[in-house]
Image (cartoon, rainbow, N blue to C red):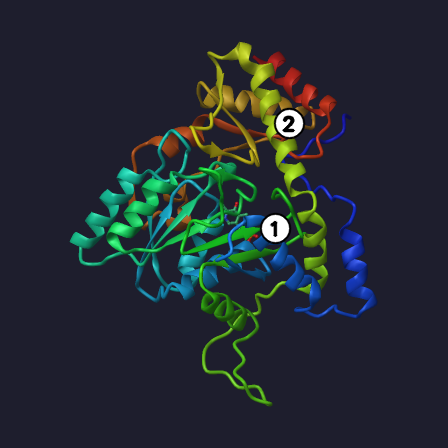
């Protein structure tokens, strides 16, 4: 059997163990510690903005959960969420007892459609409730239409929670994803562009938010010699061991972006003679995607499945694009504002092996299997 080719597998850079070893040698195995602070500084420096504050947490999902709390989302509030995304964008809305309102995508970036967002906001207001937050996602590394979404956020005074879990290293008009929302989040899960095996970060533009995020993520302990609590806390802080992996990964983030973009370019180049049957999402002007996953659009569900099942037999992993949240059984009862775009993408789209550790031969294998199949 040929070697298994994964969609997106972890890719260590080499220095990770040095940081992890330091944690062991100094016995900083507990959460908190020098690697955690170091990792937060590394991320802040990478984002190239002096006014962003980074809190390292146990997952991207935990970061979204705390982000919603920091934005004041409470029970029975409404929160707008991009429908086409991974469920982790929406689940935390349920954790706080709020109601998700799903908004469909546009074709240029596959992310939240600004026109539909405004329509949804106006409709929710007319029904008696102004949404408390907007969860917008940079899917597969492609930035959402930042200017348009930010303008609507400003116009209606509804903060954006920017889900940048898939877009670390992407930019919009030269500025890094993760710096646009009132609050943004990153993920370092095993399949993401860099990984700490599991982890996330909350990015905010205020120091108070950072302090509050750390306070809430470490069981909300008040100043006192005994254990004193005034609000409900969480155990969401990143551990110092895991942060060591993150410090090593930060050294190679730009290389990882280059490698993933190269994968995408290779797929485009080699599959371009099948243009009538396979197409790709291009970068609009001033959008720069880290190309976390390389995705193709086929001419329909039948072709999509044919490719997926054929390459699966050859030990090559692929996966349909995210199934929109408004089509998920768990969220089917919630309001949604749809235009057919995400349902169509889900039907026709397929994510191909995209790891930064794929070799030229690996890619050739995927490409020749797809060509054989159609
Ligand atoms: C991975 C991911 C998350 C969740 O991050 P975890 O670290 O796995 O909890 C959230 N949103 C999107 C879009 C993701 O892809």
- Would you say residue 103 is visible in this rendering? no
Q: Residue at horizontal 46%, vertical 69%?
A: 208
Report which quarter residue 119 is drawn in: top left
Give neighbour class at mark 2: few <14, some 14-19, many 20+ (Cα, 10 Å): some
Tag 2, which secondary structure?
Answer: helix
Q: Whole-Å distance between the Cαs marked 2 and 1?
A: 27 Å
Residue at the spot of label 2: 312
- Residue extending farthest to the top is 273
User: What is the total number of numbered labels drawn onto the structure image?
Assistant: 2
Who is closer to the viewer here, 205 or 354? Answer: 205
User: Would residue 31 appear left or right of 130 to someone viewing this image?
Assistant: right
Residue furthest to the bottom? 225
> Along the polypeptide, which appears first: circle 2 or circle 1?
1
**Which label was assigned to residue 188?**
1
Q: Is mark 1 within 8 Å of ligand 1?
A: yes
Q: How many C-alpha atoms fall within 10 Å of the one at disc 1: few (<14), some, or many (≥20)?
A: many
Residue 260: in sight, yes or no? yes
Mark 2 or 1: in front is: 1
Please state the horizontal and vertical placement of residue 120, each as a whole percent of the image: 25, 46
Name the residue: 74% across, 44% down.
Answer: 12
Q: For residue 169, which quarter of the picture? A: top right
- Residue 297: x %, y % from top left: 47, 23
Residue 366 position, x and y percent, is 65, 22
SS class, disc 1 = loop
Residue 82 image offset from top left, x and y in percent: 38, 44
Q: Residue at x 47, y 63 (%)?
A: 66
Q: Residue furthest right?
A: 25
In the picture, the quarter occupied by the N terminus is top right
Foreground residue among 117 and 32: 32
Judged left or right of residue 247, residue 218 is left
Q: Which quarter of the image is occupied by the C terminus?
A: top right
């Amino acid at each position: 059997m040929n070697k298994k080719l994964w969609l997106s597998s972890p890719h260590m850079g080499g220095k990770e163990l040095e940081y992890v070893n330091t944690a062991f040698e100094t016995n900083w195995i507990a959460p908190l510690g020098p690697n955690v602070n170091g990792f937060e500084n590394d991320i802040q420096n990478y984002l190239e903005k002096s006014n962003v504050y980074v809190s390292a947490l146990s997952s991207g999902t935990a970061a979204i959960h705390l982000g919603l709390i920091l934005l004041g989302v409470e029970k029975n509030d409404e929160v707008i969420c991009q429908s086409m995304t991974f469920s982790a964008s929406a689940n935390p809305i349920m954790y706080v007892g709020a109601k998700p309102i799903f908004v469909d995508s546009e074709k240029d970036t596959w992310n939240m459609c600004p026109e539909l967002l405004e329509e949804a906001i106006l409709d929710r207001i007319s029904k008696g409730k102004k949404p408390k937050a907007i969860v917008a996602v940079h899917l597969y590394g492609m930035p959402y239409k930042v200017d348009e979404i930010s303008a609507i956020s400003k116009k209606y005074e509804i903060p954006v929670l920017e889900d940048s879990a898939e877009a670390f290293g992407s930019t919009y008009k030269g500025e890094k994803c993760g710096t646009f929302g009132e609050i943004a989040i990153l993920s370092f899960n095993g399949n993401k562009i860099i990984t700490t095996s599991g982890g996330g970060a909350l990015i905010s533009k205020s120091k108070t938010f950072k302090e509050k995020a750390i306070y809430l993520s470490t069981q909300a302990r008040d100043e006192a010699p005994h254990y004193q609590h005034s609000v409900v806390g969480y155990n969401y802080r990143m551990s110092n061991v895991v942060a060591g992996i993150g410090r090593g990964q930060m050294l190679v983030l730009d290389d990882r972006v280059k490698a993933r973009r190269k994968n995408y370019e290779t797929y485009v180049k080699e599959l371009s003679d099948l243009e009538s049957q396979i197409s790709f999402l291009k970068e609009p002007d001033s959008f720069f995607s880290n190309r976390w996953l390389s995705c193709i659009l086929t001419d329909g569900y039948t072709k999509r499945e044919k490719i997926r099942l054929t390459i699966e037999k050859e030990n090559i992993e692929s996966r349909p694009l995210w199934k929109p949240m408004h089509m998920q059984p768990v969220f089917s009862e919630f309001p949604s504002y749809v235009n057919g775009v995400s349902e169509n993408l889900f039907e026709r789209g397929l994510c191909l092996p995209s790891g930064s550790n794929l070799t030229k031969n690996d890619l050739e294998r995927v490409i020749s299997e797809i060509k054989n199949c159609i």
